[in-house]
């Protein structure tokens, strides 16, 4: 996630240089076709780029609105995970009577929840996370490692320990329900994250937008070349760059869990929860917070 108000020019160039080259080539082709093939036969009406520009505005507006909705929903889900994680640890530490046996179970459940977050983060980003195994004992890790949905398997283990506390009368019925509701919320937030990740954004919208932008750049260059001559190549690229940059900016938000500067900062959020929960347990070995990369963004 970007932390600065101004985007560096180098980043804009890296994101758009390929499309820029295609647009420049298209503008040059349109100029030479107009200059040497159709200039003496007929003129291109200005209504063509006007209509195409209007259509593009609608398509880009729809794409960007839907993309930002996905990004903002993902951010709210993980914001909820932050709050629910703190409440979960606080309830276990406060509601379960202190004893040597209970402390082992409580700390195991809290550490297991940290493992759940790292496993979920790894699944959403499509990479094998190496942090979650260190918060599980060997027997749990062997069981969970065999599961295709590791974060869901961790929640199942949480339910087993909560049931153990209930059967031994370490938590009463009311507190059991309250803690179990938090596990249900974790499952809901896990499911919402998976839904956002696995729901494919309609490809026809992004594809048609690219086609319309290309048609607009070509037709716009054809029209203004009648007045501007060779400068129409530069003007066509400049106007096309505005549309392309806006469209790329929106498409970068389509998958909010991607490990890039536009994605949700899962590393930072997960590390923040990890630090909070370890401090609540009184642990001494606390990892350092995630720091911004180049003072520009966090992942």
Image (spheres, rainbow, N blue to C red):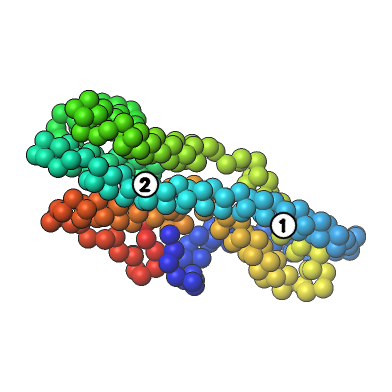
Q: Residue at x 71, y 73 (%)?
A: 231
- Quarter residue 183 falls in: top left
Say which of 172 and 117 sits in front: 172
Say which of 252 and 147 sits in front: 147
Q: Is residue 16 left or right of residue 128?
A: right
Q: Is residue 295 above or below residue 256?
A: below
Name the residue beneath numbered marker 2.
84
Q: Residue at x 67, y 51 (%)?
A: 62
Q: Residue at x 22, y 46 (%)?
A: 93
Q: Is residue 216 left or right of residue 207?
A: right
Give the residue furthest to the right.
41
Give the crowd class for mark 1: few <14, some 14-19, many >=20 residues within 10 Å.
Answer: some
Q: Is residue 85 above or below residue 12?
A: above
Give the crowd class for mark 2: few <14, some 14-19, many >=20 residues within 10 Å.
Answer: some
Name the residue beneath numbered marker 1.
57
The picture places residue 248, in percent across and down from the top left corner, at: 57, 56
């Amino acid at each position: 996630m970007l932390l600065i108000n101004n985007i560096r020019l180098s980043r804009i160039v890296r994101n758009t240089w390929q499309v820029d080259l295609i647009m420049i080539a298209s503008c040059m082709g349109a100029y030479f076709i107009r200059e040497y093939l159709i200039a003496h036969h007929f003129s291109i009406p200005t209504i063509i780029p006007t209509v195409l520009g209007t259509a593009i505005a609608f398509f880009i507006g729809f794409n960007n609105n839907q993309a930002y909705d996905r990004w903002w929903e993902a951010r709210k889900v993980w914001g909820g995970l932050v709050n629910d994680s703190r409440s979960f640890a606080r309830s276990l530490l406060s509601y379960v009577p202190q004893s040597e046996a209970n402390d082992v179970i409580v700390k195991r459940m809290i550490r297991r929840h940290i493992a759940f977050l790292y496993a979920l983060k790894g699944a959403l980003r499509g990479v094998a996370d190496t942090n979650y195994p260190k918060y599980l004992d060997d027997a749990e890790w062997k069981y969970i490692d065999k599961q295709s949905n590791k974060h869901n398997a961790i929640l199942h283990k949480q339910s087993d320990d909560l049931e153990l506390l209930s059967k031994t009368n370490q938590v009463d019925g009311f507190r059991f329900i309250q803690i179990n509701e938090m596990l249900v919320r974790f499952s809901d937030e896990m499911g919402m994250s998976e839904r956002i990740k696995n729901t494919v954004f309609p490809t026809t919208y992004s594809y048609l937008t690219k086609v319309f932008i290309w048609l607009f750049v070509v037709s716009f260059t054809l029209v203004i070349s009648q007045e501007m001559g060779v400068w129409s190549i530069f003007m066509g690229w400049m106007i096309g760059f505005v549309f392309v940059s806006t469209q790329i900016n929106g498409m970068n938000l389509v998958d909010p869990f991607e490990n890039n500067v536009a994605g949700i900062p899962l590393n930072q959020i997960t590390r923040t929860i990890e630090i909070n929960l370890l401090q609540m347990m009184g642990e001494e070995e606390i990892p350092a917070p995630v720091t911004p990369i180049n003072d520009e963004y966090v992942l």
